[in-house]
């Protein structure tokens, strides 16, 4: 057996994927909209552009005067500066194609980029999905083989978790610590606990032949007792979050490397769950998790056009913005009443309503599309 097992993976996008910081926003200070494109402006290049035209002082004055109402393109028009295509290419560090009605577009969430401005999916994000899938399968097997043990060691402990831990998103950390990290290395006395997934290295994933990203509007679809509704603002308009996304059919390539040498040094010491011992077993875990997740989402969307997407598309991997509580926690393994409790303590208390009751979707012409799905092989 080779010490290192390596496999090149391809993740083909099946529905829009967005990876980014929830706190990062690109505002009209930082972009110019031109036709069906949004150009994200480089601060350094903007400074050069303004300096050449002796506009720096006027720019600063306009920003101070107009505040959040400031629009870069309006500033240029007001100063008699015509922005041509070549100017936009010089000023911008990225551009995205607008898909949909952008009449209400103000700010958007950019996709994460590396130091060279290239969109990518961090290996930590990819590994996070794999970790969730492995833990889900391990606990599913435990629940199947020993339902009473699962009830007492998992379900009951979750029910006793404090609201503070739910609010701080710490309610499920102990599951990882207990079932994935509570190991020792052979030959080392009094060594700290070790993580089973230390044996797995996941590289960053980069798109192949990505020519441009898309800017799409995301709405929040809610399942009510009275029927399906979109979340709305006080103005009555649908709540909309604009995100920069990698479009469908683009492939993301990354590497998985498994350390068989380290595997031999790990001691399981009576662990109650079965964990993967190689890349093929890891991919099997991802497949089972995604199959159950798809089934859960089909059940949620039954009777709505969102269901059509799941019936007509194959996918076995979910990542990024819009994945939701079910994709990122062990919620599928919990009884309905416990899922409701988790939801109510983690955020807004919605009482006895279905949990989770909402999904972030792209209401594209021709159908409703969920976010974050891909096919890995």
Image (spheres, rainbow, N blue to C red):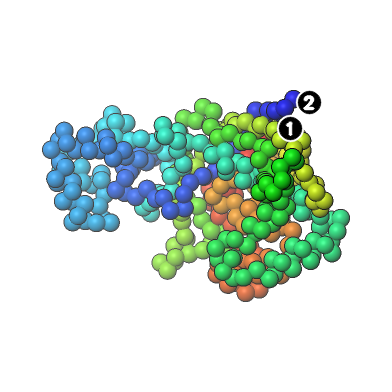
Left or right of 244: which side holds 151? right
Left or right of 79: which side holds 342? right
- Whether residues under marks 1 and 2 lie with C-beta atoms below 8 angstroms apart, the answer is yes
Question: Which quadrant: the N terminus?
Answer: top right
Q: Position of residue 60 (x, y in %)?
A: 18, 48
Kindly tell me whether residue 351 is visible in this rendering.
yes
Left or right of 46: which side holds 124? right
Q: Which residue is drawn at 44% across and 62% down?
A: 237
Up-down: is 63 above or below 46? Answer: below
Q: Position of residue 99 (x, y in %)?
A: 46, 43
Local crowd size for mark 1, using a 10 Å CA cut-off: few (<14), some (14–19), many (≥20): some
Question: Which quadrant: the C terminus?
Answer: top right
Q: Which residue is drawn at 57% across and 38% down?
A: 123
Q: Which residue is drawn at 79% across and 66% down?
A: 152
* Element type at mark 1: helix
* Element type at mark 2: loop
Q: Distance between the residues labelled 1 and 2?
A: 8 Å
Q: What count of labels does the image hold?
A: 2
**Earlier along the polypeptide chain: callout 1 or callout 2?**
2
Q: Position of residue 111 (x, y in %)?
A: 46, 42
Q: Read off the residue under disc 1.
A: 260
Q: Read off the residue under disc 2.
A: 1
Kindly tell me whether residue 305 is visible in this rendering.
no
Left or right of 101: which side holds 187? right
Q: Residue at x 46, y 41 (%)?
A: 112
Local crowd size for mark 2, using a 10 Å CA cut-off: few (<14), some (14–19), many (≥20): few
Residue 130's image quarter? Answer: top right
Q: Where is residue 284 in the image (x, y as percent from the top left)?
A: 76, 40
């Amino acid at each position: 057996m080779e010490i290192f097992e390596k496999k090149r993976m391809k993740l083909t996008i099946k529905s829009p994927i967005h990876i980014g910081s929830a706190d990062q926003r690109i505002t009209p200070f930082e972009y110019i909209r031109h036709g069906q494109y949004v150009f994200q402006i480089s601060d350094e290049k903007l400074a050069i552009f303004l300096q050449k035209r002796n506009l720096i002082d006027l720019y600063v004055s306009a920003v101070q005067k107009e505040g959040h109402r400031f629009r870069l393109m309006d500033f240029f028009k007001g100063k008699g500066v015509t922005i041509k295509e070549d100017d936009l290419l010089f000023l911008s560090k990225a551009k995205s194609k607008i898909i949909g009605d952008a009449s209400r577009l103000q700010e958007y969430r950019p996709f994460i980029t590396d130091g060279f401005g290239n969109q990518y999916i961090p290996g930590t994000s990819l590994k996070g999905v794999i970790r969730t899938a492995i833990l889900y399968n391990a606990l599913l097997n435990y629940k199947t083989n020993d339902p009473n043990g699962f009830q007492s060691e998992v379900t009951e402990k979750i029910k006793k978790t404090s609201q503070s831990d739910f609010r701080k998103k710490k309610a499920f950390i102990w599951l990882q610590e207990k079932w994935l990290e509570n190991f020792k290395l052979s030959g080392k006395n009094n060594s700290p606990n070790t993580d089973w997934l230390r044996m797995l290295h996941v590289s960053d994933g980069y798109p192949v032949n990505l020519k441009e990203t898309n800017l799409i509007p995301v709405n929040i679809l809610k399942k009510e007792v009275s029927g399906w509704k979109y979340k709305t603002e006080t103005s009555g308009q649908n709540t909309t979050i604009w995100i920069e996304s990698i479009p469908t059919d683009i492939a993301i390539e990354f590497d998985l490397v498994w350390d068989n040498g380290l595997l031999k040094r790990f001691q399981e010491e009576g662990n109650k769950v079965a964990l993967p011992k190689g890349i093929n077993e890891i991919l099997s875990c991802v497949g089972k998790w995604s199959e159950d997740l798809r089934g859960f989402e089909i059940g949620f969307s039954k009777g709505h056009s969102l269901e059509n997407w799941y019936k007509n598309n194959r996918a076995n991997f979910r990542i990024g913005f819009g994945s939701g509580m079910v994709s990122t926690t062990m919620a599928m393994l919990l009884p309905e009443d416990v899922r409701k409790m988790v939801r109510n303590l983690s955020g807004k208390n919605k009482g006895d309503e279905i949990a989770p009751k909402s999904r972030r979707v792209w209401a594209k012409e021709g159908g409703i599309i969920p976010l974050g799905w891909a096919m890995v092989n």
